[in-house]
Amino acid sequence: MSVKDAAALLAGAVIVVALANGVETTPPATTASPLGNASGTLPGLAPVTGKKDKARARAIISRLEVRGRGPSIGYSRARYGADWADTATGVPYARNGCRTRDDLLARDGRNVRYREGSSCEVIAMDLEDPYTGQLIGWSKRDAGEVQVDHVVPLAYAWRMGAARWGRGKRVDFANDPLNLLPVKGAANEQKDASGPASWLPPQRRVRCAYVTRFAQVAVKYAVPVTRADKRAMLAQCR
């Protein structure tokens, strides 16, 4: 087994049950580069470095269609289905019996703990926030400290064409792990519905990885971006 394969195996390891106190945990997450994580099922957001990888990232970004923003008329979160409900059909983790938010916390968290009697509901974990680089010791008592960000925001997608999608595509988009990252709540709130020309992660070393992930989602769902956003994305991977 290669080192790369071993790392992927560790990152996607199945839940193990600790002997002490019957608490379920997962091994430490190993962050993955978006270039090796097209399914979105590997954790985190490892930096994209090196000339070849940055060239690969620019090639993905270059595929994006450019269009002006449309109106936000008619947008609401409910247009993408109920919050984190396990109702998507065409994406990883769909219909697995767990809420999407819990799937993502379990994917990216370290020392994950579940509610007694549940193999889904995450009540505590440690998270290395990809946006700020901070290590967060999270528990459900302060649930908003960690939020699950839509890399391509739902409101952004709505203005760029999602208003014309069928409901099934919108539900998949909102629950696709490729488009979801658990992050520091304050950073997510600061980002809001911004594109890359208006907001980038405070942690500079992951900015190329972030815009690459943004581009992967936009390509997968045929979401155009503004000219300013595309220019900003290419600039991060020079």
Image (cartoon, rainbow, N blue to C red):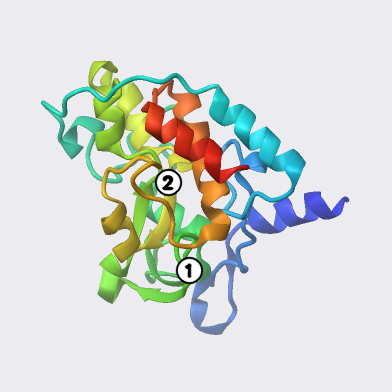
Residue drawn where x is 59% and y is 29% of the image: 60
**Residue at the right extreme of this rendering:** 1
Q: Residue at x 71, y 51 (%)?
A: 8
Q: Is residue 196 left or right of residue 210?
A: left
Say which of 168 and 4 sits in front: 4
Mark identifier at residue 74: none
Looking at the picture, which amino acid does disc 2 mark?
Leu
Task: For label 1, count other residues whose C-alpha is less than 10 Å away and answer few (under 14), some (14-19) or many (20+).
Answer: many
Any part of residue 44 in sight: no
Q: Which mark is residue 180?
A: 2
Tell me the element at label 2.
Answer: strand
Whether residue 155 can be seen here: yes
Residue shown at the point (32%, 35%) measured from the top left: 87
* Disc 1 element: strand
52 horizontally vs 30: left or right = right
Q: Looking at the picture, does residue 147 appear above or below residue 195?
A: below
Q: Residue at x 54, y 41 (%)?
A: 235
Whole-percent x, y for residue 141 in the image: 27, 76
Question: What separation in Å lies between label 2 and label 1 (alpha carbons)?
Answer: 14 Å
Disc 1 marks which amino acid?
Leu
Left or right of 63, for residue 6: right
User: Residue 224 occupies which quadrant of the picture?
Assistant: top left
Seen in the picture, residue 216 relative to 119 is either above or below; the reply is above
Q: Earlier in the sequence, mark 2 or mark 1?
A: 1
Q: Nearer the viewer, residue 13 or 3?
A: 3
How crowded is the residue under tag 2: few (<14 C-alpha within 10 Å), some, or many (20+)?
Answer: many
Where is residue 194 shown, x and y percent of the image?
Answer: 30, 43
* Camera-side residue of 237 and 53: 237
Q: Which residue is mark 1?
A: 127
* Quadrant, the C terminus: top right
Q: Position of residue 167 (x, y in %)?
A: 26, 22
